[in-house]
Amino acid sequence: MEPPPHPSPVDSNVVDTQAVDTKAETKRPPAPWRRPLWIAVGVALGLAVLSMVSRDGGGIDLLNALVRFANFVVIPGISYGCQLGLGALGVTLIYAVMRFSDFAHADTMAFGAMGVILATRVLQGMGISAGPLPTALLALPFGILGAVTLALVFDRAVYRFYRRQRAAPVTFVIASIGAMFVTNGLVRLIIGPGDQRFADGDRFIIRVQTFKEMTGLSEGLALRTTHVITLVVAVMVVLGLFVFLNRTPLGKAMRAYADNEDLALLSGINPERVALWTWIIAATLATIAGTLYGLDKSFKPFTYFQLLLPIFASAIVGGIGKPLGAIAGGFVVAFSEIAFTYPYRKILGYLGFETDSLVQLLSTDYKFAVCFIILVVVLIWRPRGIFQGRVI
Amino acid sequence: MRMDTDTGMGRPFWLALAMAMALVAVGVLQSWNVAMAILNLQLISALMALGVNIQWGYGGLFNFGIMGFTALGGLAAVLVAMPPVAEAWAVGGRGMATAAVTMAGTAAAIWALHRLIKVKALRGPAMALVFVVGLALTRSFYSPSVAAIEAVDPSVTGFLGGLGLPIMVSWLAGGALAAAVAWVIGRITLGLQSDYLAIATLGISAALVAVLRNEDWLARGVKNVTTLPRPVPYEQDLQGQDWFVDLSVRVGMDPSLLSGIAVKALYALLFGSVLLVLFWLSHRALHSPWGRMMRAIRDNRDAAEAMGKDVTRRHLQVFVLGSAVVGIAGAMLVTLNGQFTPASYAPFRYTFLIWVMVIVGGSGNNGGAILGGFLIWFLWVQAEVGGPWLMTLLTSGLQEDAPLRQHLLNVAPHMRQLVMGCILLVVLRLSPRGLLPEPRGRHGLAQQRNGTEHS
């Protein structure tokens, strides 16, 4: 190939000004943030109008409606969104680096959570507890260790072979289905297919009754320990991950490898090291997500397998390969699932619209249908997701 | 890879023979009833695997929605074979028809608005308005009718019933229903690339099954339809016949045992003939110019497109055909079970297991897919039996009531997931193109047709 002609100084000058221009353009706040802002403003205005038109005692009723909405939609939505987001983060990282959708991820979550449960049982047996917090938080490292080991075994035994062959992504997907079967079988073999509850410590930070007494409202707001823990842990993990990806040499290497494999290889990045750390991080995230989900609801292998779809939906909605997108996608999916299947009768009653119907947009059983509808809408209108991820 | 290019006739023959021997061994060692039950489900699984192979092996389409099409076939069996519930039609038929008309009207109006309004700013709000009004109108007819229908003798019917036709008709209807739905789904999703298509179809199939579970007026939802008619005589009727009792005496077998085997054999005959016909058809299709075109599209989409092949249309075609085959298998499965239980449709069993069959058997090779269906179903069933047996053996050193032993024995049937995963991974590693790989290279299909031409 002929070397490109050397640009004259004048040319380079022109190029530079253009570069500055495009930089200035990209500095504008990204579009995806603005729309939610406007929606929030619109909702707030609507509520204000509603409170004015609603009948006697409008202010109190509006508060009641808001509290009920927060109790049944916002708080569960935030914690479910965090759990989905952490799961989707793992999927999106694996996709960014290995370039395949890991169908075994939901089962890795189950495997990690299983490790946490077993360690919790041992710790409880030894009489160790974390006081008001669930013992599972102490057991987390053991679960992470188990999940990471499993992920690395799969990488060495299965994926590395195909990576070296530079096999088609489809082969990886099929191999991940094999891994899914194996992991699922292992979880069922070790802990059984039944329901496990392992949350201990204080269940509530604010009880419904206490809240009612405190505020004098007729609606109560329950703040469960698991909700707060989910939010705090998720924020910590996500911040840690972003610092890792943006500041450390290894994180930068991973991003470079994800952006352009050949270029990264040329600059001396060791692909095996990148793969190793991707699996370690993905398995850690999966364990944390699985444990938080299990603490919040309960642990059952089949339920975890069913999380696969919402997790993929979150990753795709956010833009696959984009870590920030995975979190945003998790919240979008979680809030839509809850908002579409929540019966609004009482809330509307507070606002002055008495109805006999439940005002439930969809029956609760259509949860999965909701995330599928979001998926299709996003794929048709914005195939690269909110954050302009990759097109598979 | 050298050995893969030269399979000839030997390998399929020996593998099929080994499969038959294994079935005979089950018959001798366990019981012939078990062997026949396995055979029936093997035939249905093989048909499903054939359907997946048409999509994946011929067309390279990553369809993870097999479960949905299987369930649609099952729905067709209910809608065709159950007798109509006249009372339900009387109370809710008109309302449901009106709801269907308003829904279609809304869809048509939205489509028309999409076409007619050229101003972009107006189009969205107008469409949304029509959608909301149409939805409210549809629901105002739909909800009372559903309530009325489901109130009709809810413990027995509570649904609209079917057409009351022979259940064999439903096999064709199942194929047709699955094909129709596949056409719609394909129009939406086939623009997507591999992984997206897999996830989207996985989601659609979950949504489809959710609909079947919840819409009680359609097929009783989770209350199940358990009284489906049979295409073959009942065991009790056979045992009442003089000639059958005579036969059982002559064979030297208990009449109840023999009647079970005879009924299952009749099923196997029916399923086997459907499988043979569809195998022959897909074999002819694969070896026709159409099949060569499909493989060309699969192997190099861009080149095929440059040669003027309409890739999107061909993908849609192969998606519809494969789904129809799966739908037929779904209707046959419900026929065999004699009941339609929407809650039993799980992606593990009806999507991923079928995929394991195709990958292990050999994608792109119809015989391979069928062999995979037979083999994997056999192992799936036998692992459930073999797991506890192995666990008993492994834990025989432990005390009878040791908690570990009890736990291991309890969970042993779940070993089959593990076994399936290992088989898939091992085959994918050692023989990536399956046990019966698609013929390629010197002995490949194209070369056979074109003589000794070198490319």
Image: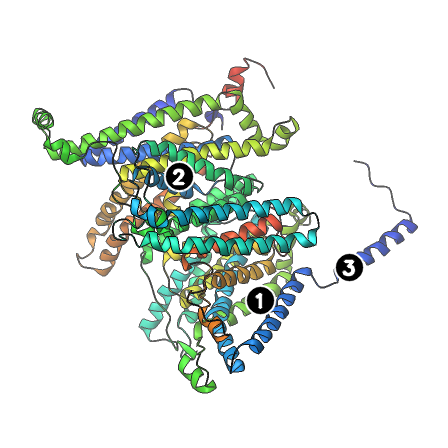
- Mark 3 surroundings: few (<14), some (14-19) or many (≥20) residues within 10 A: few
- Tell me which residue sits at (33%, 72%) in the image: A124
CA gap between label 1 and label 2 equals 41 Å
Q: Position of residue A224 (x, y in %)?
A: 43, 75
Q: Which residue is mark 1?
A: A240
- Relative height, residue A94 to residue B436 (above, below): below
Question: The residue under label 3 is which amino acid type?
Answer: Glu
- Name the N-terminal-most of marks 1 and 3: 3
Asked which secondary structure carries label 1, the reply is helix
Q: Nearer the viewer, residue B236 or B419?
A: B236
Residues behind callouts 2 and 3 on a single chain: no
Of all chains, the one bearing label 3 is A
Q: In this view of the protein, can residue B101 be seen by the observer?
A: yes
Of all chains, the one bearing label 2 is B
Q: Which residue is mark 3?
A: A25
Which disc, if any, is residue B354?
A: 2
